[in-house]
Image (spheres, helix red, strand yellow):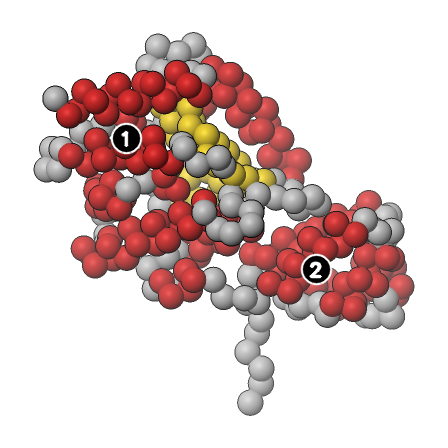
Amino acid sequence: MPNSPMVPTVRRRRLGATLRRFRNEAGLSLDQAAEAMTWNGPKMSKIENAVQGIKPGDLAELLKVYGVTDPDVCAVLETLRRDAAKKGWWQAYSGIVQPAYADYISLETDAEQVCVWTPLLIPGLLQTAAYARETITGITTTRTPEEVTALAEVRMARQSVLTRPGAPLEVWAIIHEAALHQRFAARPATIREQLRKLLDASELPNVTVQIMPLASTAHPGLEGGFSLTKFRPPLPEVVLLENAGSATYVEGEDASPFARAYERIRATALPVEDSLVRIAELEEGLRQ
């Protein structure tokens, strides 16, 4: 019975793309790199296109061919190679989680920092379960109540990266004040609990929350929300753009404009301390 084809996981795709970049920087063609490794050209192409994996010894040798000797860089790529075939906890929700969403969870799991700008919603990493269920129910047009519950569970499980041992994910969230004024008629306590969650999360040393005030000056974020995900070098930054029913990824040099835009958005938003005061005032007002 033939072997089943290898599924190109997001980690394997990123490893292949990074190896392709190193090959290009070394000025080598596919055939030249393959010849240096005593491989055939198709094997090199399959590795770069995530169709085939690469052995640890081969990865180390290939990096030498490309002149990559930095031990930290080599260690990052070896970790990516080693973990390429690992299944994440989200695989248990494969019938619910779309492939693009699963890819993002994998990226988020590997990341060092996520910078998110959300003009309409509280970021998923900082949501309460009740807020997640309410917003998922409102946004989706095809999900059953059971699927909504499962998606809310996924969103809560994602938050474990904030407290993971050793290297918790750093999150910088800029949220438009309009999202804080959202009221849910059927469950009015939802937003108050969500505001309290933002205040509690901001006490973590790796979580920073800023608010974009209703009376702000114009800024690049007016074009829409996005998430900028950062990794240890040499892995490039990845930007996630979401809209109704789809997701687009922007990577490498193409992500640079978003990094610059985020700095301008950050400079336009309220300072961190003022932002927390604004959240606390709104939360206090909902208690009355």
Up-down: is 132 above or below 14?
A: above
Q: Secondary structure at mark 2?
A: helix
Neighbour tally class for label 2: few under 14, some 14-19, many 20 plus, Cα within 10 Å: some
Counting residues from the start of the chain, the first of labels 1 and 2 encountered is 2
**Residue at 86% over, 48% down:** 26
Near-viewer residue (90 or 193): 193
- Hey, which quadrant is residue 3 in on the image? bottom right
Give the position of the C terminus as an image quadrant.
top left
Q: Can residue 2 be spotted in the picture?
A: yes
- Asked if one can make out residue 222 in the rendered structure from this viewpoint, the answer is no
Relative image position of residue 51 (x, y in whole percent):
63, 66
Q: Is residue 101 left or right of residue 287?
A: right
19 or 170: nearer the eye?
170
> From the viewer's perspective, is 140 left or right of 271?
left
Task: Give the left or right position of residue 174, taking residue 170 as reference.
Answer: left
Which residue type carries mark 1? Leu
Residue 251 point in image, percent of width and height? 60, 41
Q: Is residue 48 above or below residue 203?
A: below
Q: Quarter of the image containing the N terminus? A: bottom right
In percent of the image, x 51 and y 45: which residue is there? 168
Residue drawn at x 64%, y 65% as measured from the top left: 82
Say which of 75 and 27 sits in front. Answer: 75
Q: Position of residue 159 (x, y in %)?
A: 40, 47
Q: Which residue is mark 1?
A: 195
Instruction: Tell me the tag on residue 78.
Output: 2
